[in-house]
Amino acid sequence: MAYDAYQRVIEFHRKAAHLHEAAAASHDKGDHLTAHELSKQAHEHSTEALKHSEAAQEHFRAGKDLGRP
């Protein structure tokens, strides 16, 4: 697994965190529809981050080269 895969995991986590913050801000402003949509997107990014993290863990356990610099 290439180092780029780790960067993807980090990016998904960062996007999810940002979307959670944006959803909270929308909710505070009373825009519940936007807050719900942003929360849904955040959940999708969190799920993708988990999938990529699990794949990286499996490669690590298998002793495969992770392609890190």
Image: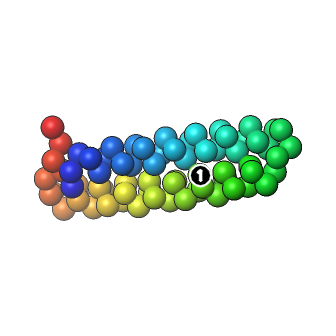
Quadrant (top left, top right, bottom left, bottom right) of the C terminus: top left
- Taking the spot 36% from the left edge, 48% from the top edge, the residue there is 8
In the image, taking residue 38 as reference, residue 4 lies left or right, namely left
For the view shown, which residue lies furthest in the right direction? 30
Residue 18 appears at what percent x and percent y?
58, 40
In the image, taking residue 26 as reference, residue 18 lies left or right, namely left
Of 64 and 29, nearer the camera is 29
Residue 36 appears at what percent x and percent y?
73, 55
What's the amino acid at mark 1?
Ala
- Colour scheme of the picture: rainbow
Give the residue at mark 1: 42
Of 39 and 66, nearer the camera is 39
- Taking the spot 40% from the left edge, 43% from the top edge, the residue there is 10
Of 65 and 42, nearer the camera is 42
In the image, taking residue 57 as reference, residue 21 lies left or right, namely right
- Taking the spot 23% from the left edge, 59% from the top edge, the residue there is 59
Quadrant (top left, top right, bottom left, bottom right) of the N terminus: bottom left
Relative to residue 62, is residue 7 depicted above or below?
above
For mark 1, does the 10 Å Cα neighbourhood hold few (<14), some (14 to 19), or many (20 or more) residues?
many
SS at badge 1: helix
Q: How many marks?
A: 1
- Taking the spot 50% from the left edge, 59% from the top edge, the residue there is 47
Residue 9 appears at what percent x and percent y?
38, 49
Q: Quadrant of residue 50?
A: bottom left
